[in-house]
Amino acid sequence: MNDILPPDSARWEWLEGKVRTLMDRYSYRNIRTPIVEPTALFVRGLGEVTDIVEKEMYSFEDRLNGEHLSLRPEATAGVVRAVSENSMLYDGGKRLYYMGPMFRHERPQRGRYRQFHQIGAEALGFPGAEVDAELILLANSLWRELGLQGVRLELNSLGQPQERQAHRAALIAYLEQHSESLDEEARRRLHSNPLRILDTKNPGLQAIVNAAPRLIDFLGPESLAHFDRVKAILDANGVAWTLNPRLVRGMDYYNLTVFEFVTDQLGSQGTICGGGRYDYLMEQVGGKAAPAVGWALGVERVLELLKEQDKAAISLAPDVYAVVPSISSLPVAMRTIEQLRVLGLSIQMHASASADGSMGSMKSQFKRADGSGAAYALVFGDEELTRGVVSIKSLRDGVGAQVEQSLETVSLWAGNLQSRPTN
Ligand code: ATP
Ligand code: MG
């Protein structure tokens, strides 16, 4: 679990800002659900025989009433619960997005944390392939907005439960033939949840898994037609994809379309975003049946990739550093600074660093001003203030150039400054 500190936190805010803008363009609305949910929600929703439910959840008993609770390991189950409890689909489908921390007790390693953050988009109440495609286009345009490169899209279809049933039998028969080569976990899941074995991270099992019967070969015409509609929309939009018949995802709630966005630049934790259709989850967690589809991206991994690609270099420099040589100047200086802030300027004011309250030498204040990266220093010197002016010193272009402005008109000067670029 990490502290997220400046200047890194500015990159988080930058990313979140990009996401908000984009979600609005696609007409997805923000939803905020609790971080703690009943454990049963995740057990029922994600599936009992999944890594998350078997060993990754932070679960505890409420000391007051003995309720079984868990920190959310993902947000889809909570969103589905909220949509159902609040009857949000009464007047049609809903497009939603969220951002926030998730918790999984995993072995910490690069790109894998115990408190990590996801941004997710969910469309509930829509059965058509066009919404699967819309969500993929949304994620894809996010990579474009962020300037990310080298993100690949992998697609698969998990079909419908009855098609999975037929595949399951074939898969179990195949895996039984190789049972002596399976690891302990795979052997345990052989009869409870064999599809999960295809998701194994054990490199020693890859050959067996690669040659296993493919679910896609068991799909009927309707499932295939749904998949084709998704692919046709992606193709029409020039979104490249590859079929990955081994793609099953980590939760049991998916059906039909599943997808992942992957990169080769983050080592073995290369999936930055994953999702798919989950038409049965609503009913599974006790709501009225409703189709749904969504994805979640890992914020830490996306930021790591941005760093890898030297994107999202964010400047925390204020526009102005206010140099205030003496305490007696503070009231006038701070009144002026407040006026300039109203105009939108970002201003870092020099503050006393010593217990006696003295403001420090001009030299040390200018050192701070330079260090802040500000383009200008406003110097509220005693002598200037008695004349009703403040001096403005350029710290970047034409360093040292100094002009005086009347305190009455300094807002005019501020208004002429090139407006601060919004990151
Ligand atoms: P993985 O295969 O990497 O374990 P997952 O299938 O468990 O991922 P999801 O539950 O689909 O992942 O979560 C969506 C995204 O959240 C992942 O693609 C990844 O980017 C991110 N993510 C998942 N687990 C973690 C974690 N422990 N730390 C950081 N990011 C994570
Ligand atoms: Mg995982």
Image (cartoon, rainbow, N blue to C red):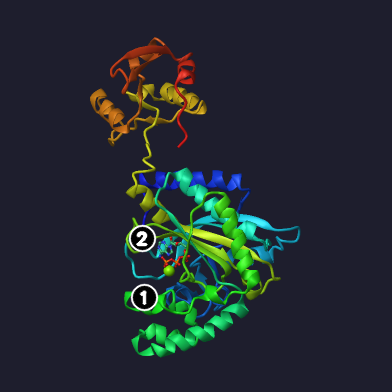
In the image, residue 28 lies at what x, y percent?
61, 51
Instruction: Tell me the quadrant of the picture where the C terminus can be found.
Output: top left
Q: Residue at x 39, y 83 (%)?
A: 185
The amino acid sitting under disc 1 is Gln
Q: Where is 87 relative to 362, above or below?
A: below
Is label 1 in a helix, a strand or a loop? Answer: helix
- Asked if residue 24 shows in the view, the reply is yes
Which residue position holds label 1? 206
Is label 2 in a helix, a strand or a loop? Answer: loop
Left or right of 178 on screen, residue 361: left
Q: Residue at x 64, y 71 (%)?
A: 221
Using the image as rendered, state which of residue 252 and residue 134 is in the foreground.
134
Furthest residue in direction top, as rendered: 387
Q: Residue at x 41, y 90 (%)?
A: 177
Label 2 CB-ligand 1 distance < 8 A: yes
Where ligand 1 lies, by image quadrant?
bottom left
Q: Residue at x 43, y 21 (%)?
A: 332
In the image, residue 315 lies at what x, y percent?
37, 36
The CA distance from mark 2 to mark 1 is 22 Å
Using the image as rendered, state which of residue 251 and residue 335 is in the foreground.
251
The amino acid sitting under disc 2 is Gly
Q: Where is 295 relative to 349, above or below?
A: below
In the image, residue 379 lies at what x, y percent?
34, 20
Left or right of 277 on screen, residue 90: right
Tell me the tag on residue 111: 2
Instruction: Tell me the quadrant of the picture where the N terminus can be found.
Output: bottom left
Q: Earlier in the sequence, mark 2 or mark 1?
A: 2
- Asked if residue 32 shows in the view, the reply is no
Dot 2 crowding, Cα within 10 Å, few <14, some 14–19, many 20+: some
